[in-house]
């Protein structure tokens, strides 16, 4: 297998990086997370729709995870991830419609969704949707109760759809980890103690090296899972479990380590690092925690 991106995929990635960095500077991420009722604007959503991002999974899973990684890197507060997951499970999210997935009575972005779908693929109608406090303030969380469930679409390969959603979430965690690592490295070069940058000390430089190892390992696992979902379905269940377990752990461990490199400033509300830590922690619990995926790896490996 070849983990190098094609020219088209590189273009998608660079376009996503450029647009998201312009639309979501961290000051805007903070504003949307803390002060905006919905957590995103219609203009931001319309721009993503115009780029065709809600339907990008129809091109390929790799194309979707390339954008997902950039969403995590920018920490973009957007219902795009939930819309992808709902669309993969068979919900009609064409023409700019937004979707959300209900799992164990909870759903990210359900309050602004045009269509709700259960993790089992059934469409939810007439349900009560109430906001609840979320660990990650950049993604609104809701409790969904009652309503009717319509049978899932017979055209959906549910196992593959769930695998794509989990891999998308893992890719976002890679982006979160990469940005947190870069923040740590930049701070280690800038902050000085005893007339030396703190990055010159082994305790700090080794921590940064470990962050890089986890980011690159997680990215490789996610690319493998995305490739397998599109081209080697017999390998996909194992690859998805590996990607979600490893990237989910990296998405929270790297921000934690970055916070330690930052020291006291990293613990303050004014610093933006805590938003990355919270997104990474929330992602680690979505679409199956690492423990469940590691158990699946063991079962698939016959252990």
Image: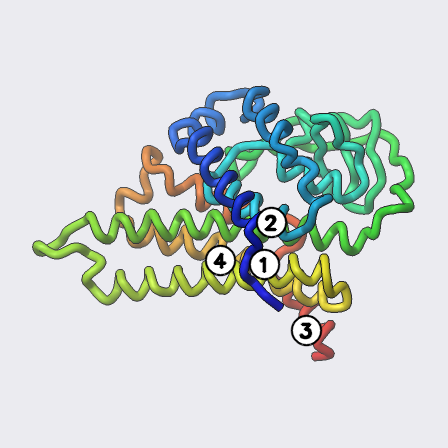
Quadrant in the picture for residue 24: top left
The answer to whether 211 appears left or right of 222 in the picture is left
Query: Which is more N-terminal, label 2 or label 4?
Result: 2
Location of the N terminus by quadrant is bottom right
Q: CA distance from mark 3 to mark 4?
A: 20 Å
Foreground residue, 264 or 299? Answer: 299
Give the residue drawn at x 70%, y 46%: 59
Query: Which is more N-terminal, label 4 or label 1?
Result: 1
**Residue 65 numbered tag:** 2
Q: Are marks 2 and 1 in contact (CB under 8 Å)?
A: yes
Query: Which is more N-terminal, label 4 or label 3?
Result: 4
Q: Are marks 4 and 2 in contact (CB under 8 Å)?
A: no
Foreground residue, 61 or 200? Answer: 61
Q: Are marks 1 and 4 in contact (CB under 8 Å)?
A: no
x then y, percent, for residue 27: 38, 28
Query: Which is more N-terminal, label 1 or label 2?
Result: 2
Q: Which residue is mark 4?
A: 250
Q: Is residue 221 above or below residue 129?
A: below
């Amino acid at each position: 297998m070849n983990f190098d991106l094609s020219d088209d995929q590189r273009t998608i990635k660079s376009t996503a990086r450029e647009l998201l960095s312009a639309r979501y500077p961290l000051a805007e991420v903070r504003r949307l997370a803390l002060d905006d009722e919905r957590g995103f604007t219609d203009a931001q959503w319309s721009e993503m729709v115009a780029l065709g991002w809600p339907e990008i999974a129809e091109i390929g899973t790799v194309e979707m995870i390339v954008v997902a990684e950039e969403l995590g890197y920018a920490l973009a507060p957007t219902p795009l991830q939930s819309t992808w997951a709902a669309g993969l499970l068979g919900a009609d999210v064409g023409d700019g419609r937004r979707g959300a997935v209900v799992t164990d009575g909870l759903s990210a972005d359900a309050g602004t969704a045009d269509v709700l779908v259960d993790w089992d693929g059934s469409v939810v109608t007439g349900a009560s949707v109430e906001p609840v406090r979320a660990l990650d303030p950049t993604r609104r969380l809701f409790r969904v109760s009652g309503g009717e469930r319509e049978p899932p679409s017979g055209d959906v390969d549910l196992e593959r759809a769930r695998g794509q959603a989990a891999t998308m979430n893992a890719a976002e965690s890679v982006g979160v980890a990469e940005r947190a690592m870069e923040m740590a490295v930049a701070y280690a070069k800038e902050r000085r103690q005893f007339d030396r940058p703190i990055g010159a000390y082994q305790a700090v430089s080794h921590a940064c090296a470990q962050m890089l190892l986890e980011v690159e390992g997680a990215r490789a696992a996610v690319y493998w899972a995305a490739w397998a979902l599109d081209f080697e379905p017999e390998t996909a269940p194992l690859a998805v479990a590996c990607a979600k377990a490893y990237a989910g752990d990296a998405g929270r461990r790297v921000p934690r380590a970055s916070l330690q490199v930052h020291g006291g400033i990293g613990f303050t509300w004014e610093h933006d690092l805590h938003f990355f830590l919270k997104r990474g922690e929330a992602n680690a619990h979505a679409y199956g925690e690492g423990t469940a995926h590691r158990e699946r790896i063991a079962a698939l490996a016959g252990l």
